[in-house]
Image: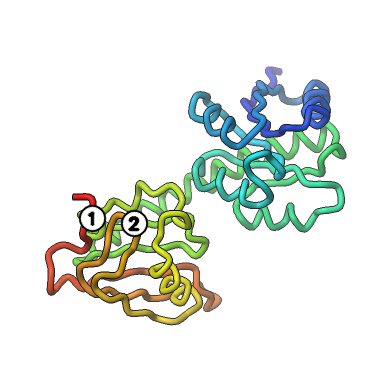
Amino acid sequence: MTEQIYKILYIEDNPVDIRFFQEIARELKSIQLDLKVANSLAEARDTIKASKLDLIVSDLGLPDSMGLYTVKQIISEFPELPVIVMTSINDEQLGIQAIRMGAQDYLPKGNFDSGLLSRAIKYSVERNSHVYRMNCLEKDKFITLLENIPLGAAFFYKDLNRVESNSEFNRSADLSDITDIEQDLNPEFTNLLSSALSGQEEQVEAGTMITQKAQFQSPARLIPVKDSKGKACGAICIIDMKKSGKPLIDLNA
C-alpha cells in the first residue's frame, strides 16, 4: 500500500525541538513527510509562497512573532493551509485558544509520539479541506450579496483581520488589498468600529479617515451584525451615497 506523502512546513527556531520533530517524523508508518523548516515567521512566509504545502506546524514563540499572534497571522494570510500549533506541556488552554482562532489541532512540544502526530496531520488536512471549501462557497455568496446592495458596503469581521467590501465601497480605496486591518485602520474609525462590534450602532461623519490613504466623503453607518446567539460577529458599514457618487476620497490621487 502506497503511503500518503504530506508536504509540511515546521516553523521553529529551537534546534532541539526541530531534531525531536524530525526523529518522530522518521518513525511514522502510515504516512511520509516531505518536511521543510523555517526559523521565523518571515522565513515561513517566503517558504509558503515558494512552495506547495499541505500543512503548517508552528511553534508559538518565534523570534519575530509571539503567542497567538503567530496563529492569527498565518491563518489570515494563508487560510487554505491547515495549522497545527505546538504548545508547552502545561499550556493546554493556549492550544484550545489557538483552535478557536482557526488552528486545526495542537500538540505538546516534546511530548507526542508518531501515532499522535500521524492522526493530527491526517485529521487536520482533511478537516481544513472541507472547512475551506465551505468557507469559499459562503464567501462567494456573501460577496454576491454585497455586490447587489445599491450602496457602498463593507463587512468587518469581529477579529478585524478580514474585510469584505463591494465595488462601490472600493471605488477609490481597495480595502481588499490590506494585509493587516489592525495596522491600517485609522484609530478614529477603529474606535467607532469597536463600538459597533460591542453592539452599538454608530454614525460615521463625512471626512472621517478610514485608513491613512482614504476618507469617507459621505456619511456612513456602522451596524452590528449578530449571530444566532445574539453576539456580535462583525459590523457592516453602509455609506449614504445620495449626496456623492464617490464613497471614498483617495488622498494619494
Q: Nearer the viewer, residue 130 or 180?
A: 180
The structure residue drawn at horizontal position 55% and vertical position 41%, both measured from the top left corner, is 129
Q: Quadrant of residue 93?
A: bottom right
In the picture, residue 63 is in which quadrant? top right
Query: Which three-letter amino acid code belongs to the residue tagged 2?
Result: Gln
Give how far across and how far down residue 160 sits, in percent. Answer: 48, 60
Secondary structure of residue under mark 1? loop
Q: Position of residue 19 (x, y in %)?
A: 81, 25
Residue found 30% across the figure and 54% down from its top: 213
Q: Which residue position is annotated with label 2?
A: 212
C-alpha separation, residue under disc 1 versus residue under disc 2? 8 Å
Label 1 or label 2, whichever comes before in sequence order: 2
- 88 or 1: which is nearer to us? 88
The 10 Å Cα crowd at callout 1, few under 14, some 14 to 19, many 20 or more, is few
Is residue 118 shown above or below 180? Answer: above
Q: Which residue is identified by label 1?
A: 251
Q: Is residue 252 left or right of 6 when viewed as pictured?
A: left
**Residue 98: where, in percent of width, then height?**
67, 53
Q: Residue at x 85, y 34 (%)?
A: 113
* Towards the viewer: 15 or 103: 15
